[in-house]
Amino acid sequence: MHLLAPEPGGTALAAPPTVGFVVSRAVGNAVTRNVVKRRLRHLSRERLAGLPEGIETVVRALPASATASYAELGADLDRALARTLPRAAA
């Protein structure tokens, strides 16, 4: 996961947080990649309220995400956010 925090005093502070996804062919075929993207999109939507305004997030799905359960993907996303949000605030 990568985060891009807005610069202090910039115009992006008023923008809502955004999330993008990178799901490579290593994850699986097109159907599998789309399932992973849909799951991550839904999980991210639930967590958008907790993200600061103007922040841009990129989530990169690893090949193990193809076989991960919905709960495992959610836990991994929470863990990644907890690890990267404090760095973006600094």
Image: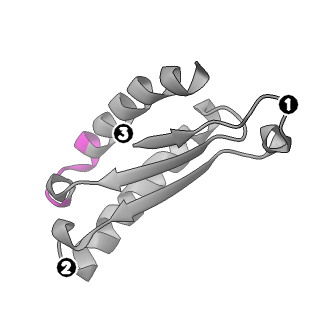
Distance of label 1 from label 3 (alpha carbons): 29 Å
**What residue is pinned by disc 3?**
77
Which residue occupies 17% across, 51% down? Answer: 68
Residue nearest the observer in this picture, 71 or 87: 87
Secondary element type, mark 2: loop
Q: Relative to 37, does residue 59 appear above or below in the rendering?
A: above
Classify the position of the N terminus by image quarter.
Answer: top left
**What residue is pinned by disc 2?**
29
**What residue is pinned by disc 1?**
9
From the top left corner, tell me how far across and down residue 55 is, in percent. 64, 40
Identified by mark 1, the residue type is Gly
Q: How crowded is mark 1: few (under 14 residues within 10 Å), some or many (20 or more)?
A: few
Which is in the foreground here, disc 1 or disc 3?
1
Among numbered discs 1 and 3, the one appearing first in the sequence: 1
Residue nearest the observer in this picture, 52 or 38: 52
- Is residue 40 located in the magenta-colored stretch of the structure? no
Q: What numbered label is drawn on residue 41?
A: none
**Which quarter of the picture shows residue 48?**
top right
Identified by mark 2, the residue type is Asn
Secondary element type, mark 3: helix
From the top left corner, tell me how far across and down residue 41 is, in percent. 46, 57
